[in-house]
Image: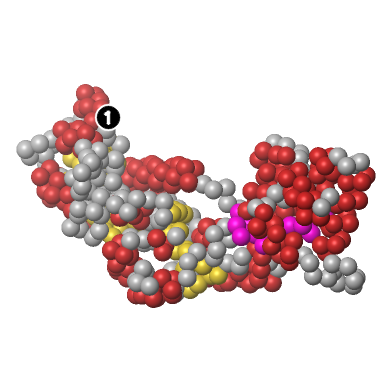
């Protein structure tokens, strides 16, 4: 049998591989394959055919050798012969599935019958090849497995995004000078493979900027995997990022790939990077420098092709000075920086943002859009917006639900806004505060003192109106 396989291997050597171009396979440079067969000719044939297309191909002549290899690193696909010395491929496949191995397995045999095929499917085989098979048959089976693997990975990422989604804005909205500068910077940075550090206060849209970098990059066909470093327990974050092997810690009944693995070929977004524990900062620095990860409990490093985009709302220079952030990691992350302005520094964008959120949220909520006037926008423009764009979005959603602009800010923040409005209006001798007082009292008079009706017409909450009237002694 070995002689036959060797002869077949020569007949379908690499010189004949271009003949299967109709398969239209793209390189699987991020995929790893383990070939398990005790026939040297078949092993050589499979290794040569797959090594051209896959990032990593390893071979084993028995189940024991395969187990040893699998304990040291993850494999996306196992191409496994059924007839092996000591233990059959089907028997080992049963055991693999019981242990939690979720990768694809293609079974091969030279002695197939219906019962064997049924046993293979029951054991959890992804595909089945009858020897002798052509290069095209083998590559098509591998292609099907990788396509299923890609779908599983995409589904994992989508489920995770749905679990953690914050309904962030889908586009960079605004036409102010500062936001145009940010967009131009993102557009210039995106096609490069460089690591990016995004600065900005909470609510300024750091994940939005990271997604824009990914969409306009050469990795846009790959996954975008976000993780909030502050939202994961310190003892779990290393496993979440790098994965772990079976038995790495209490409760690790099976191995699991980390987010670096799922982000291969795409972008990993590390939000709130300043919250990473110092020991993990050192490990992240090593990953950024060597492009390899080591799952928890493993002695084997696994190469990864991932672009890292990090974000923080803290001053990392100050964090470094206080010993809370590694200086070397900071300099490794800030290859290129993007600084997102707070909303108070781009007030010119308020009308565009308000219109955008009204249209987006009204459609999502299934209610009529809310009309606004210059007076409503003027009130919004006088507010300091400590919660930035996220706070504005929440206010618009609240206003749509209530049916009027609900400028019910916290008293101390509203007081600051009123104080800032005490400057003279350009071209008049009357302050904005005086104009506001005259307008509100005029509406109250029209409503014959009915504060609820006046508040509705003014587009403010009854609480806000009562507070202003109390200040004026009305």
Helix, strand or loop: magenta stretch: helix
Between 98 and 379, the one lying in front of the other is 379
Report the residue at 33% width, 61% height from top: 277
Name of the residue lying farthest toward the left = 86
Between 410 and 111, the one lying in front of the other is 410
59 sits to left or right of 377: left
- SS under mark 1: helix
Report the residue at 67% width, 38% height from top: 365
Report the residue at 47% width, 64% height from top: 312
Query: Magenta segment, which residues?
Result: 375-390
Say if residue 350 shows up in the picture.
no
Query: How crowded is the residue under tag 1: few (<14 C-alpha within 10 Å), some, or many (20+)?
Result: some
81 sits to left or right of 274: left
Up-down relation of residue 46 to residue 419 (above or below): above
Between 250 and 418, the one lying in front of the other is 418
Say if residue 235 shows up in the picture.
yes
């Amino acid at each position: 049998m070995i002689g036959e396989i060797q002869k077949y291997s020569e007949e379908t050597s690499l010189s004949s591989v271009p003949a299967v171009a109709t398969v239209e396979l793209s390189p699987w440079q991020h995929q790893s394959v383990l070939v398990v067969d005790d026939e040297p000719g078949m092993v050589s044939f499979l290794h040569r055919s797959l090594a051209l297309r896959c990032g990593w191909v390893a071979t084993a002549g028995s189940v024991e050798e395969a187990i040893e290899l699998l304990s040291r690193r993850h494999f996306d696909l196992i191409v496994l012969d059924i007839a092996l010395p000591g233990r059959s491929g089907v028997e080992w496949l049963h055991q693999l599935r019981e242990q939690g191995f979720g990768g694809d397995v293609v079974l091969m045999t030279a002695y197939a019958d219906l019962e064997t095929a049924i046993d293979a499917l029951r054991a959890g085989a992804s595909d089945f090849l009858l020897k002798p098979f052509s290069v095209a048959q083998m590559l098509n089976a591998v292609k099907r497995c990788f396509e299923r693997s890609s779908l599983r990975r995409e589904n994992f990422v989508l489920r995770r995004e749905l679990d953690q989604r914050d309904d962030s804005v889908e586009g960079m909205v605004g036409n102010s000078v500062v936001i145009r500068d940010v967009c131009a910077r993102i557009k210039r940075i995106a096609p490069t493979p460089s690591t990016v550090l995004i600065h900005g206060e909470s609510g300024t849209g750091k994940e939005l900027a990271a997604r824009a970098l990914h969409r306009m990059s050469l990795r846009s066909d790959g996954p975008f995997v976000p993780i909030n470093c502050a939202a994961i327990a310190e003892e779990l974050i290393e496993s979440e990022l790098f994965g772990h092997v079976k038995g790495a810690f209490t409760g690790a009944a099976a191995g699991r790939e980390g987010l670096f693995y799922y982000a291969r070929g795409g972008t990993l977004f590390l939000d709130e990077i300043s919250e990473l524990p110092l020991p993990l900062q050192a490990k992240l620095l090593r990953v950024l420098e060597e492009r390899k990860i080591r799952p928890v409990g493993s002695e084997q490093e696994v190469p990864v092709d991932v672009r890292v985009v990090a974000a923080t709302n803290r001053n990392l220079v100050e964090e470094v000075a206080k010993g809370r952030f590694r200086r070397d990691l900071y300099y490794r992350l800030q290859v290129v920086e993007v600084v997102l302005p707070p909303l108070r520094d781009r007030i010119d964008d308020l009308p565009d943002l308000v219109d955008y959120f009204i249209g987006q949220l009204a459609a999502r909520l299934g209610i009529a859009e809310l009309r606004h006037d210059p007076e409503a926008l003027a009130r919004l423009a006088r507010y300091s917006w400590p919660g930035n764009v996220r706070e504005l979005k929440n206010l618009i959603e609240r206003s749509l639900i209530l049916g009027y602009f609900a400028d019910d800010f916290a008293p101390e923040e509203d007081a600051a806004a009123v104080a800032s409005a005490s400057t003279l209006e350009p071209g008049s001798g009357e302050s904005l505060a005086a104009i506001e007082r005259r307008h509100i009292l005029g509406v109250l008079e029209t409503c014959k003192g009915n504060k609820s009706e006046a508040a509705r017409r003014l587009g403010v909450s009854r609480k806000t109106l009562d507070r202003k009237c109390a200040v004026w002694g009305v």
